Amino acid sequence: MLIGLYLLLNFAVLWFVARSSAARRWPLAMMLLLLGFVVGSANNLLEAVVYGVLSLRQAVAAAVPAAVVFIILSAAAVLAAGRWKIGSQAERPHRATLIQLAGVVVAYQVLYWTAGTLVYPYIAHFYAAKTIPPVYEVASLQVVRSLIFFGAAYPLLRAGLRSAPLIMGLVYGVIGGIAPLLPDNPYMPADIRFYHGIETSVSNFLFGLIVGYLFTRARPLRPAHA
């Protein structure tokens, strides 16, 4: 049942993205695949490896089925959204600036440490026996992860995305927060997944709002035609 909910949530969000995107057909499907796989699997597995929750081999083994899932869901979302038809596209916004990228990094750092501090008392026992890197290494990793999160969404944002702040909030909050923590797995108990789910869904949703706002506030996009 939880697997079904995981698939449904990911599909629903990808469908919303497809409906809001000015891109079409295979380019859109590839953008959705990049977005879903990186946000919903690869970037989280990177952190799990660094924190010692998974070995590199285990992370790769988990990434392969996730990639297959997002290949299927991305194509299905484009089809369900009616985006296989050829249509006009919105004007491309400006390229990301260093100031915008700095804003992305700062926002993620603030949200990550704030959410982590609030949830840590509830998950401390799980990490007590694990080797957690020094604070400066964790902070450095989050710089990389924040830019990876942004990079996964960049093609879609460049192509044109209506209601970008809300859409990005759903992407990061659901695909990168709630959904991947729903299915049972041998590496993280249900109670830890529950607390992490609250932590990541809220902080990631706020991060998505900020990313969408930072990237689209300077130039409004012309609406894409259905």
Image: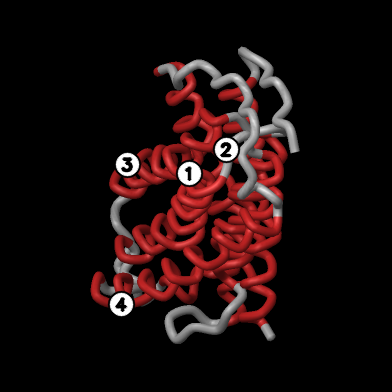
Depth order, front residue of 225/100? 225
Q: How crowded is the residue under tag 2: few (<14 C-alpha within 10 Å), some, or many (20+)?
A: many
Residue 37 sits in quarter: bottom left
Residue with the mark numbered 3: 140
| Residue 44 percent location from the top left of the image | 43, 60
Secondary structure category for the residue under label 2: loop
Q: Mark 3 or mark 1: which is in front?
A: 1
At horizontal 40% and vertical 46% (from top left) the residue drawn is 145
Amino acid type at circle 2 is Ala
Marking on residue 58: 4
Placement of 197 over or under 189, stated as above or below: above
Label 3 residue SS: helix
Can you tell which quarter of the image residue 64 is in? bottom left
Question: Depth check: 159 or 1 in front?
Answer: 159
Examine the rendering and report whether any part of residue 84 can be seen: yes
Query: Which amino acid lies under the numbered mark 4 shown in the image of this protein?
Result: Gln
Q: Please provide percent x and percent y for residue 120.
A: 54, 61
Q: Which residue is mark 1?
A: 27
Comes first in the chain, label 3 or label 4: 4
Q: State the separation of the CA atoms marked 4 and 1.
A: 31 Å
Q: Quadrant of residue 119?
A: bottom right
Tell me which numbered mark, 3 or 1, is placed earlier along the sequence.
1
